[in-house]
Image (spheres, rainbow, N blue to C red):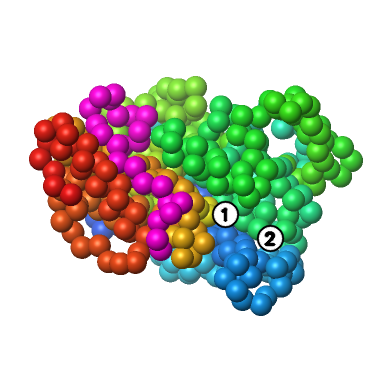
Amino acid sequence: MQTPSRTVDIAILGAGSAGLRAYRAAREHTDSVVVIDPGPLGTTCARVGCMPSKLLIAAAHAAHDAGRAHRFGADIERAPAVDGQAVMARVRAERDRFVGFLDDTIDAWPEGVLVRGRASFVGPRTVAVEGQDQGRITAKAFVIATGSRPVVLPFLQGLGDRLIVNDDVFDWTDLPESVAVFGPGVIGLELGQALHRLGVRLRVFGVNGLVGPLTDPTVRDAARDAFSAEFALHDDARVSSVVRDGDGVQITWEDADGVHEDRFQFVLTATGRRPNTDRLGLEHAGVHLDPRGVPSFDADTLQVGRLPLFLAGDALPDRPLLHEAIDEGTLAGRNAVRVLQHAPLDRLQRRSSLAVVFSDPGIAMVGHRHADLPADTFVTGHVSFDDQGRSRVMLRNQGHLAVYADKASGRLLGAEMVGPAAEHLAHLLAWAHQLRLTVPEMLDLPFYHPVVEEGLRTALRDACAQLGALGTPCAA
């Protein structure tokens, strides 16, 4: 059945996290809203991102903890048997449950709100819809929340069905024998380590010594040491050949020890994601795209040029995180309404930057990155978790935390870390950063004993001592 061409106040392209929030914000002011999405429905987070990856990681943690229980004196087999089919059955079932909640939300929308199909601009304010619902839709304002897709490097594109992206992993019915991961970033570390702990033979290949999103050399070195002690991590690989070999892939690389070859059942590419804005025909709306396929936009209002177009979520090239997508979607939907009302646009109130990698040890970054801070304007407080009390008790004593404080004011500027309880320490640091607390103000807050947070206090005391030596008031 074809949907006839129609005119609405606001059209939202994409029914992911940002699109859903944009719809909610827009519907507070007008009922003339459509959401266009080709499917499959279900946000990136629920379907192929945050939640299914944590299900796989949870299974990996269970197997890993059982396998090292003997180190605590517990009489458990050192190599627990992993039932790959059972692991993946739970991942798929729980993934489908999370997606089902979102399906229920969309099913409750009024008839005609959801338009199933792929939208592309054919004019400044008109999109053609190709797919289940055919037709053209003209809108007074648009929110573009079309998400992103994995980047596949050219030298990997000839591998056929032996090449996978993170989306593919969560449809497996069993675990493979071996996987090579290209890209030790967020996705590569999380999925790679989880697969390794579930018994999958693993190698991870990177370039330029990068590990996760870390930019602090000391923290990055600690991360490299921790992960390479557990699985094969080549953070500066010189890969000379990646070729399809029957039902597998043969990889050749070189390092200081010579030339090596290995064969894998699959190659997982985790070298970043690209916004889907390059596939929307935005040139027909008078929009110029940069080499990444992203239009120029106002980072405060999310508006594209002076057009009634707004970007949100992973369609933006930075901060591809759920909580950011929700904030951006809400603002984009609200500003689309304000265009209709000829009212001044609202401006995005960014929260303190917060990013977490759910590896073990975990990685976290808060506020300003080390690489973004001007030299000679800050001090760095350090702590190693190697001998931190509670971490050692739990056999999780790996990693390093660095906190950055302004030399003149003592205010917390940011932090990077790899270590135990990273996701929780990151929240404490993000709250302190957003409240613009100084190092001495943070040290005045309570710290219990024995907890991992005492490691944060050690790093703050280190920063405090350096501030005091510079004449900035700070008493540890």
What residue is disc 2 on?
198
Quadrant of the image occupied by residue 143? top left
Using the image as rendered, state which of residue 390 and residue 111 is in the foreground: 390
- Give the left or right position of residue 132, taking residue 459 as reference: right
Residue located at (55% from left, 47% from top):
226
Q: Quadrant of the N terminus?
A: bottom right
Q: Position of residue 358 (x, y in %)?
A: 49, 54
Give x and y (percent) for residue 334: 26, 48
Callout 2: helix, strand or loop?
A: loop
Vertical placement of residue 100 versus 301, above or below: below
Q: Residues within 10 Å of mark 1 (few under 14, many from 20)?
A: many
Q: Position of residue 232 (x, y in %)?
A: 68, 43
Give the amino acid type for the residue marked by disc 2 in the picture: Leu
Q: Which residues are magenta?
A: 362-390
Question: Which residue is farthest right?
Answer: 246
- Discs 2, 1 touching: Cβ within 8 Å: no
